[in-house]
Amino acid sequence: MLLRIKIEFFYLSIAKLKTSSRIVLPLTKRIIMTRSSKTFIGILSFTPIIFTVVIIIMVFNMIPQFIEWDKQEPDFYLVFSTLMPFIITAIFACLISLGLLIFFLIHMLNNKLMEPVEKIIWILAFLLAGTVGYPLYWYMRIWNEKV
């Protein structure tokens, strides 16, 4: 599987947190990814931007068809066949973008090395910058992750 994610628990070597029943509690939980899975996530993080460019090009290519439809009424099949590639591409782009948002939020929330203020800043970056924040987060927090 391309995305092998191992969860590793680190314990303090000097003073472990222990409860009264002598159960050792993990202090931090980190997601460790291989270089190939980091590369795969990096490629995926750029795909929403690429899909946005493709959708804009598709809309501009449909403008002459829309102008022709203004002159004569098209039938349903013609409209459906013209708009279907656009609709399928837009749905696919939305699904990839939503999946990446969920993945990056889970990765960010499980990253115990990040300060809470930085997590809030990344959430705002995802909400305000949209898909532009995905490659930035991937490069700064996944690709350049200090192990």
Image: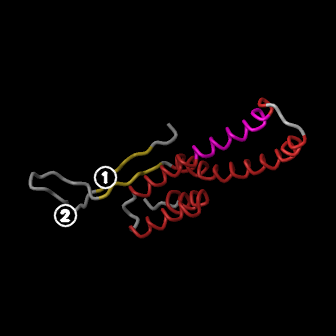
> In what element is the residue under mark 2?
loop
Span colored in magenta: 79-96
Q: Which amino acid does label 2 sit on?
A: Ala
The magenta stretch spans residue 138: no
Q: Position of residue 22 (x, y in %)?
A: 12, 52
Q: Residue furthest left?
A: 20
Number of numbered markers: 2
Q: Which amino acid does label 1 sit on?
A: Phe
Residue 65 position (above or below residue 105): above
Q: Position of residue 9 (x, y in %)?
A: 31, 52
**Residue 111 in which image quadrant:** bottom left
**Residue 27 in which image quadrant:** bottom left
The magenta stretch spans residue 84: yes
> In what element is the residue under mark 1?
strand
Q: Which numbered disc, 1 or 2, marks the residue that appears first in the sequence?
A: 1
Q: Mark 1 points at which residue?
A: 9
Main SS, magenta region, reads: helix
The numbered dot on residue 85 is none
Which residue shows up at 54% across the image and 46% down it?
A: 36
Taking 74 as reference, is 35 left or right? Answer: left
Image quarter of the C terminus = bottom left
Which residue shows up at 15% across the image and 57% down it?
A: 18
Q: Mark 2 points at which residue?
A: 15
Which residue shows up at 78% across the image and 49% down it?
A: 57
